[in-house]
Amino acid sequence: MRIILVGPPGAGKGTQAKLLSQYLHVPQLCTGDMLRSAVEADTPVGRLVKGIMAAGTLVSDEVIVTIVSGRLKDEDCQGGFILDGFPRTVEQAIALHDMLRQEQQKIDFVIELQVNEDLLINRIRARASQAQAAGNSVRTDDNQETLKQRLLEYHGKLLSVLEYYKAQHLLTTIDGMQSISAVTDKIRDIVKYA
Ligand code: AMP
């Protein structure tokens, strides 16, 4: 089962992707986490994307497509995956389609979590203060200014990605403002029709 989870920062994508990954026994591929690990490990890619991520803008399609296509070739991805944070542009969506087509594979579902912006801002604030309280480092992009930039990027580019998948009848939109378990139930309802 190959699934894309889509939603603005703070929509609960990461939480749901993790739960769905455990439920379906397929890996969760979170491009934000992959990039953060590269930054932490101070790899050449990490050095390239550090400033871009801190500013809340998008890493180039070329860089992210190279990372994702490498990861999709791994053995554990052959039975399926949950993509979280990718594709973010139509170019990335087309590149993903081409990668999968080479392996006679395709995306089964694109699930969008819809959440209003005030709630998002509160959630991101809570994530930053929880991390601080737990003594963990706060994500450099979890602050008001960067969040605005990330939401702008989201609305600017992702709408066309959603249109792209809608045209292919792959898109299902669910209300991401319900409880975590209610959202999980909705997602499971969608994927059980595979
Ligand atoms: P996220 O954790 O998904 O909010 O991603 C954090 C940051 O990583 C984003 O603000 C971007 O700078 C970068 N990023 C993650 N995924 C992508 C992607 N598919 N395309 C471009 N940039 C990305």
Image: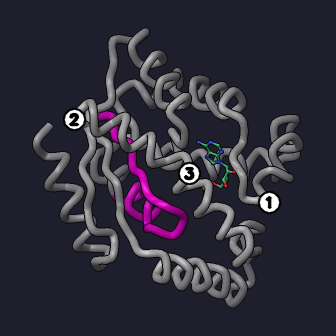
Residue at mark 1: 54
Foreground mark, 2 or 3?
3
Mark 3 residue type? Gly
Mark 1 residue type? Ala
Foreground mark, 3 or 1?
3
Q: CA distance from mark 3 to mark 1?
A: 19 Å
Residue 116 shown left or right of residue 45 in the figure = left
In this view, the residue in front, 67 or 61, is 61
Residue 20 shown left or right of residue 189 in the figure = right
Circles 3, 1 touching at the beta carbon (< 8 Å) = no
Residue occupying image coordinates x 71% and y 46%: 35
Instruction: Please determine whether, in this image, residue 160 is positioned above or below residue 143.
Output: above
Foreground mark, 1 or 2?
2
In this view, the residue in front, 7 or 160, is 160
In this view, the residue in front, 31 or 56, is 56
Rendered location of residue 142, percent (x, y): 69, 72
Instruction: Please determine whether, in this image, residue 192 is positioned above or below residue 183.
Output: above
Residue occupying image coordinates x 39% and y 50%: 5
Residue at mark 3: 156
Rendered location of residue 120, percent (x, y): 50, 76
Please check the rendered image and state whether residue 7 is part of the magenta-colored stretch, yes or no: yes
Magenta region: which residues?
1-19
Q: Residues within 10 Å of mark 3 (few under 14, many from 20)?
A: few
Q: Residues within 10 Å of mark 1 (few under 14, many from 20)?
A: some
Rendered location of residue 51, percent (x, y): 86, 53
Helix, strand or loop at disc 1?
helix
Q: Residues within 10 Å of mark 2 (few under 14, many from 20)?
A: few
Residue at mark 2: 169
